[in-house]
Amino acid sequence: MSEPNYFRLSSDQEALYAYVLGVPRAILNMPARVDFEEPIDEAKAFEAIKLTVKRLPFCTLRLHEYEENKFMQYYSDEEPEGFEIVDMTDKSDDEIDEYLADLAREPLPNNYNDVQLYDAKLIRRSGGLHILYFNGYHMLMDSVGLISVITYFFKVYEALVNGTELPAPGPGPEKHIEKSWQYFDSKRCREDIDWWKSLFDTPPHFSSMNPRPSPEYVEGENYGWPLRPDQFLCTSMPLRIPAETVNQINEAALANNMSPMIYFALALRTWLYRMSGSEDICFDTTASRRSTLYDRDCGMTLAHQIVWRSNVPGGDTFREGLRKMNISQKEMYRHHGVVWDYWHNTNKRFGYPEDSIFSRCVVFTYQPYFNAEGLNVKFHANHVNTGYAFQPLYLNMMPHDASGDLWADYLYSHNYLDGENLRHFHEFMMKFILTGIADPEKTIDALADECM
Amino acid sequence: MFEKIVDIMLEYNDVPRESITPETRFLADLHMNSLNIMDMVGQMEEEFDVVIPTEDLNDIFTVQDLVNYLNNLV
């Protein structure tokens, strides 16, 4: 057998690997389930998932550890392994949930070295229905990459059912990998570094979803330090936002020429301001970094987690708060490329450990697109909780199906945050937004008082 | 100017060229997100050698708005 053609990781992959050294490996699993709500052709669905991972170039990548904790990658043409049709027709929903949770917690074999970086099962359940379970390793795909696998699977399945041509597989990620390294030698990179330096010319304030005087505010004890091992354990709490409400927010946002994300972000930062007592607020957000069609189609891990720092006085109106958040988001997005490296330097500059969470306890992701166009089967998709999270709270907003509903998925450290408090936050967020839309001249403070 | 802008837009939007008209709206019709818009703005700044302040983007709803804005700058 000839030696594979090894090539380097992208800068995003290297940064991600460095970021998770020393934490449970299953934390990088990205498991999803698609519950089909109508019968499907089992044989064709099983064939479709195998064809999907063989045809999408990024899915065929494997990692090779050439020195301790140093990896190259290569394309593999080996057949997918471990795919199964699992008969659970006599099992309850709870038993199926438990089976999937166990799968999700299982790290991929051989320390991810020289093995396929995904797993798939087709679950046969009672009533003639099926669940597709797919787990991709985060070094290979981010959540958008994972969605692209699932949507490609839908297209392949429909092509097999209809006897039509299979969809084109999309490009390989080599161009992205090359670009990701060229960036660091560019003028743009230097300008981005300067911009982030000026944004963080003063140390940010710590904020938490919990109100003061929660223990994480205690200087030198919890404040500014990495999570303890038991705080990586997490619980998932998805809360539905009905389509009618989503449409109301979308219409208001479009009229203001801004993303609906800004409304949710203003509500989140207002909660953090009220909990921490500081108007200078930071939380993380995920930038998918898939602007061009090539980026969209090449899969892989391209997303960056970047820090959204904003200062909106409580005396500002809702309208003015939206405007400030809209500008701060766009400014941050102009400079999204550099942050992985830069953030570590920021931690050092203010005397915090490199892996410290110090100023942020929320990662907010708004991903309202799930393109299931052409799929003629009703489904409901969701992530499967691995039981682990890097940071106290991931708030992921995305659709789970084609109904128009949006879901706020709260994935939270249950040894750090309280589920009931997060439910209270969710109610606050929705009330704050809808009351603000109804009367945009109300101040942030007045809205916060009314909606808390 | 319009044609040059459409050339760049087609790198970011999976739509037929003929579907982009002066009235096409970036958010409502093309469903572009803020990150895509900012990357596209960055590319246009390089292409036309201009600087587009972020505040000015609030008033750019349509392709024609962008054409008018860039015509004033270049």
Image (tube, coloured by chain):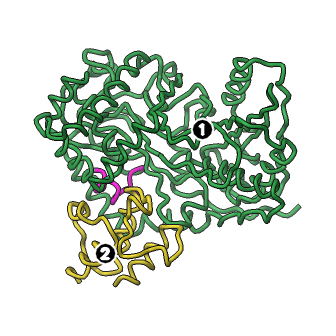
Q: Choose between A104 and A68: the one closer to the eye.
A: A104
Q: Is residue A232 left or right of residue A9?
A: left
Q: Choose between A314 and A174: the one closer to the eye.
A: A314
Identify the residue position indicated by label 2 in the image: B64
Can residue A429 be seen in this snapshot? yes
- Residue A432 is one of the magenta-drawn residues: no
Asked if A184 appears above or below A317 in the picture, the reply is below
Residue A375 horizontal/vertical position (percent):
68, 50
Identify the chain of the residue marked 2, using the numbered disc in the image: B
Q: Residue at x 38, y 26 (%)?
A: A426
Q: Residue at x 62, y 37 (%)?
A: A381
Mark linked to residue A28: 1
Q: Choose between A18 and A391: the one closer to the eye.
A: A391
Give the drawing colour for chain B: yellow
Residue A185 horizontal/vertical position (percent):
41, 68
Can residue A70 be seen in this snapshot? no
Q: Secondary structure at mark 2?
A: helix
Q: Is residue A218 left or right of residue A317?
A: right
- Residue A332 is one of the magenta-drawn residues: yes
Q: What type is the residue that disc 1 sits on?
A: Leu
Q: Is residue A39 left or right of residue B73?
A: right
Q: How many marks?
A: 2
Quadrant in which the N terminus of chain A is drawn: bottom right
Mark 1, Cα crowd under 10 Å, few <14 / some 14-19 / many 20+, is many
Identify the chain of the residue marked 1, using the numbered disc in the image: A
Q: Which chain is green?
A: A
Q: Residue at x 20, y 47 (%)?
A: A201
Q: What type is the residue that disc 2 sits on?
A: Gln
**Circle nearer the viewer, 1 or 2:** 2
Q: Residue at x 35, y 56 (%)?
A: A333
Residue A389 horizontal/vertical position (percent):
52, 30
**Magenta-tinted stretch:** A329-340
